[in-house]
Image: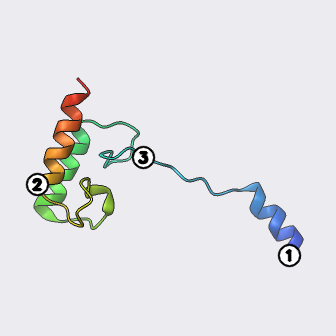
Protein backbone atom coordinates (compact mmCIF):
# COMPACT_ATOMS: atom_id res chain seq x y z
CA UNK A 1 0.00 0.00 0.00
CA UNK A 2 1.40 3.36 -0.98
CA UNK A 3 1.43 6.30 1.39
CA UNK A 4 -1.32 8.10 -0.51
CA UNK A 5 -3.58 5.02 -0.29
CA UNK A 6 -2.93 4.71 3.45
CA UNK A 7 -3.76 8.41 3.94
CA UNK A 8 -7.04 8.03 2.07
CA UNK A 9 -7.86 4.94 4.15
CA UNK A 10 -7.12 6.80 7.39
CA UNK A 11 -9.31 9.73 6.35
CA UNK A 12 -12.23 7.37 5.74
CA UNK A 13 -12.18 6.44 9.44
CA UNK A 14 -11.48 9.67 11.33
CA UNK A 15 -10.93 9.55 15.07
CA UNK A 16 -13.81 10.97 17.06
CA UNK A 17 -13.30 12.60 20.43
CA UNK A 18 -16.10 12.52 22.95
CA UNK A 19 -16.38 15.17 25.59
CA UNK A 20 -18.20 14.50 28.81
CA UNK A 21 -19.64 16.75 31.46
CA UNK A 22 -17.73 17.06 34.69
CA UNK A 23 -19.32 14.50 37.01
CA UNK A 24 -20.41 12.09 34.27
CA UNK A 25 -18.29 9.28 35.71
CA UNK A 26 -19.94 6.51 33.71
CA UNK A 27 -19.78 8.59 30.51
CA UNK A 28 -23.39 8.09 29.47
CA UNK A 29 -23.99 11.77 28.71
CA UNK A 30 -26.02 12.44 31.89
CA UNK A 31 -25.14 13.28 35.46
CA UNK A 32 -27.23 11.10 37.73
CA UNK A 33 -27.25 8.97 40.85
CA UNK A 34 -25.45 6.25 38.89
CA UNK A 35 -22.45 8.57 38.63
CA UNK A 36 -22.61 9.19 42.38
CA UNK A 37 -22.66 5.44 43.10
CA UNK A 38 -19.72 4.84 40.76
CA UNK A 39 -17.69 7.61 42.40
CA UNK A 40 -18.53 6.33 45.88
CA UNK A 41 -17.41 2.80 44.94
CA UNK A 42 -14.19 4.17 43.54
CA UNK A 43 -13.44 6.10 46.72
CA UNK A 44 -14.12 3.06 48.91
CA UNK A 45 -12.25 0.51 46.80
CA UNK A 46 -9.88 2.73 44.83
CA UNK A 47 -10.61 0.44 41.89
CA UNK A 48 -9.78 2.87 39.11
CA UNK A 49 -7.12 5.50 38.76
CA UNK A 50 -8.87 7.82 36.36
CA UNK A 51 -9.00 11.60 36.35
CA UNK A 52 -12.74 11.38 35.55
CA UNK A 53 -13.28 10.91 39.31
CA UNK A 54 -11.22 13.97 40.33
CA UNK A 55 -14.07 16.45 40.00
CA UNK A 56 -12.57 19.25 42.08
CA UNK A 57 -9.25 18.85 40.26
CA UNK A 58 -7.07 18.62 43.34
CA UNK A 59 -5.11 15.57 42.16
CA UNK A 60 -6.98 12.98 44.21
CA UNK A 61 -10.35 11.29 44.46
CA UNK A 62 -11.97 11.76 47.85
CA UNK A 63 -15.01 12.99 49.73
CA UNK A 64 -14.72 16.48 48.25
CA UNK A 65 -15.39 15.01 44.82
CA UNK A 66 -18.39 13.15 46.25
CA UNK A 67 -19.83 16.36 47.74
CA UNK A 68 -19.26 18.21 44.46
CA UNK A 69 -21.12 15.56 42.48
CA UNK A 70 -23.96 15.33 44.99
CA UNK A 71 -24.46 19.11 44.84
CA UNK A 72 -24.36 19.02 41.03
CA UNK A 73 -27.09 16.37 40.98
CA UNK A 74 -29.24 18.24 43.51
CA UNK A 75 -28.99 21.45 41.46
CA UNK A 76 -30.48 19.64 38.47
CA UNK A 77 -33.79 19.00 40.29
Q: Residue 52 got which mark?
A: none
Q: What's the distance in space between the residues labelled 1 and 2, CA to CA?
A: 51 Å
At 27% across and 59% down in the image, what residue appears? Answer: 57
Is 34 situated left or right of 66 in this image?
A: right
70 w.r.t. 75: above or below: below
At 13% across and 63% down in the image, what residue appears? Answer: 45
Q: Residue furthest top?
A: 77
Q: Which residue is mark 1?
A: 3
Residue 71: image quadrant is top left
Q: Which residue is mark 2?
A: 63
* Eye-nearest disc, 3 or 1: 3
At 20% across and 52% down in the image, what residue appears? Answer: 39
The answer to whether the residues at label 3 and label 1 have Cβ atoms under 8 Å apart is no
Find numbered disc 3 in the image and state the secondary structure of the residue it sits on.
Answer: loop
Q: x and y percent of residue 42 in the render?
A: 19, 58
Q: Which residue is mark 3?
A: 20
* Eye-nearest disc, 1 or 2: 2
Q: Earlier in the sequence, mark 2 or mark 3?
A: 3
Find numbered disc 2 in the image and state the secondary structure of the residue it sits on.
Answer: helix
Q: Is residue 23 visible?
A: yes
Quadrant in which the C terminus appears: top left
Is 2 situated left or right of 76 in this image?
A: right
Find numbered disc 1 in the image and state the secondary structure of the residue it sits on.
Answer: helix
Q: x and y percent of residue 27 in the render?
A: 38, 47
Q: Dot 2: within a 10 Å radius of its alpha carbon, few (fewer than 14), some, or many (20 or more) residues?
A: few
Q: What's the distance in space between the residues labelled 2 and 3, CA to CA?
A: 21 Å
3 w.r.t. 58: above or below: below
Q: x and y percent of residue 14 in the render?
A: 69, 56
Amino acid sequence: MENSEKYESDMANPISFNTYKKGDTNRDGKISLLDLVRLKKNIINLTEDDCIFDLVTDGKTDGFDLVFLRETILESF
